[in-house]
Amino acid sequence: MTAPVLPRAVGSPLARVEAREKVTGEARYAYEHAPDRVAYCAPVGATVARGAIRGVDAGGALERAGVLHVIWAENAPRLADAGDGELALFQGRTVAYRGQIVAAVVAETLEGAREAARLVRVHYDEQPHDVLLREDHPKLYKPDVVNPSFPTDTEQGDPDAALASAETSLDATYRTPAFHNNPMEPHATVAAWEGGGLTVHDSNQGASSVQRTLSRLFELEPAQVRVISPHVGGGFGSKGTPRPTVVLAALAARVAERPVKVAATRQEMFVFVGYRTPTVQRLRLGADDAGRLQAIVHEVAEQTSTVREFAEQTAVATRVMYAAPNRRTAHRVAALDVPTPSWMRAPGECPGMYALESAMDELAHAVGLDPVELRIRNEPDAEPESGTPFSSRNLVACLREGAERFGWADRGPLPGARRDGRLKRGMGVAASTYPAYLSPARAAARAEAGGSYVVRIAASDIGTGARTVLGQIAADALEAPVEQVRMEIGDSAFPRAGVAGGSMGTASWGSAVVKACRALRDALAEHGGEVPAAGLEAGADTADDVKAREEYARHAFGAQFAAVRVDADSGEVRVERMLGVFAAGRIINPRTARSQLIGGMTMGISMALHEESVMDERFGDYVNHDLAQYHVASCADVEQIDAHWIEEHDDHLNPMGSKGIGEISIVGTAAAVANAVFNATGTRVRDLPIRLDKLLG
Ligand code: MOS
């Protein structure tokens, strides 16, 4: 592994380098590209949840002025198999879920395409559908692995016997609904074919990955596909893998022989771009009188589609959290007639830790221990299930620091005891964790004759500040002022890199950037420190470094504290204060880091109190298809929110010593709120979101 970077620019609260471009509207997002002769494509979604397409009557649509094509299974170009059924647009007549794209209209205008899409008549042979997840669903099966490649089940010791003989035990089932990611910028693509090659301006979390998928689907060399994505307005995982929208744009542009634009409408964001699976989670904990865990059992039921298996790793965080000699985790998945779930911020850890950290709170109450103390008492020496040493683990420090800063000592342990007129007040705590992954990446660094540097990598800035922090990292590796370094990212023509996902972007791209910048410095030294007139360039690839990493359990940890007030008459819950304290290695930019952390915490408040995709069993569809009906926390829902981090030095991570921060702050948040609601009211809500009716019932 490359030697650590000595921080100069790293650690300073730099503003986003493209901030001015963004606030002045100069930063162009995918859909804003307007090539000559551009046409517009609107999808037609299935109106049945299961069945087969008997035929398509496109007459009414094609009669409209400006309508160019109606595409469906009968006339669409053939695509190669890219291993994701959601992307096999128009390759068969099977309907796997309501809203699945079954046809599309290409027209001269956006309005014309949408209007004509309404006029396309699709005839179906409809079959009965099965769309509701239950813990006893007969279709539940054991997948080979859970995402991305964890064992489905684990077991150590004899958890059943340990539960039976434990002095205190808990058996509780928690439920989370489906959640839909809603970045401000929807999935959007402008696709154009030229000279047999394909260029897309696309909104995604990784240009290299979209390039690879499109080249497979259309049987092109990767170099024949260019994906350009300099600015992306959020993703939260929904843009982590290519979605049907990018394929639709490329396919329609091929049919139309013109550039084509596609953007998901807000309503379509609730259909075919992915969502978080609902979960049913049974947690059993057994402890001795001192609160030391003897057994942990975490069993999960969740859903996937019939199109593709997506098996969320919901119980995986339970394998790394607390010591206990007897333990079991298990995942079961049912393939229903629903859209395929996909990545959503902290997939696995987020819903799983809601259940585990709620159960820990219930156990603390049952054994009469402070919930902070219960967690400290069950702190493991090494990663509990693997026995692998942690590269660093500062959960206890986060809990202690958070308790101090938050005023945890003022919390009364007795639920429902702090009442102020109609208002009941309470506090809750929960732990958070997220793995510190590293993926291989390449980068190129170039010195220009005038003394400036350009660093290129196909990294992705989805609004997090990636471009800015990579510039800071590059500057320190080059030992140059940050103003002299320009980052060029978001283009598959740049050296290949992994996605902005799994909270591994900065760590992975930064490692390649450091390596390329060091190679450039060495090359410059060979030139006696002089930059040749033509400039000088060096490249790097971290594939071997990633493989050669020592065996450590690498995770970030954190502690979330929430104070709520609950209206005794209306059941309304307000989060009046929230504090997250995190241990995530070196923080590269405190300004963008804070923004990420409080953003994740806000999303966690939203999960606790507001968000819920409601399945209508009759039609087999989520009924709340827009932001009027799917409630997302707004500024008014967040009163005081703050994020802190502790100094953590970890030499086993990467040259920056950093862990990811994109996802950890949504982990544990919902449990902290639910635990605070219990402390305020004495009512334990075990199914999210915590709606008024559940508190008044
Ligand atoms: Mo994140 S859900 O890993 O993009």
Image (cartoon, rainbow, N blue to C red):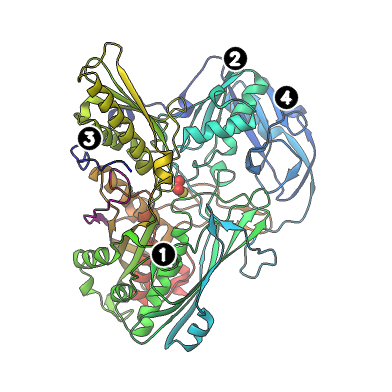
Q: In front: mark 3 or mark 2?
A: 3
Q: Nearer the viewer, residue 405 or 515?
A: 515
Magenta stretch: dominant SS? loop
Packing grade of label 1 (10 A; few <14, some 14-19, many >=20) is: many
Check if residue 646 falls in the magenta segment.
yes
Disc 3 vs disc 4: Cβ atoms closer than 8 Å?
no
Q: Residue at x 53, y 29 (%)?
A: 189
In the rendered structure, which disc, 2 or 1, sits on the residue that comes first in sequence?
2
Vertical order, 58 against 420 (above or below): above
Residue 248 seen in render: yes
Report, in whole angstroms, how far the alpha carbon at label 4 lies from the one at label 2: 29 Å
Q: Nearer the viewer, residue 301 or 453?
A: 453
Q: Nearer the viewer, residue 550 or 348?
A: 550
Quarter residue 133 falls in: bottom right
Tag 3: residue type?
Asp
In the rendered structure, which disc, 3 or 4, sits on the residue that comes first in sequence?
4
Mark number displayed over residue 342: none
Report, in whole angstroms, how far the alpha carbon at label 3 lies from the one at label 1: 34 Å
Q: In front: mark 1 or mark 4?
A: 1
Instruction: Name the outermost residue toward the top.
Output: 533
Q: In front: mark 3 or mark 4?
A: 3
Residue stretch rendered in magenta on the structure: 639-656
Disc 1 vs disc 4: Cβ atoms closer than 8 Å?
no
Badge 4 is on which residue? 62
Mark number displayed over residue 476: 3
Badge 2 is on which residue? 195
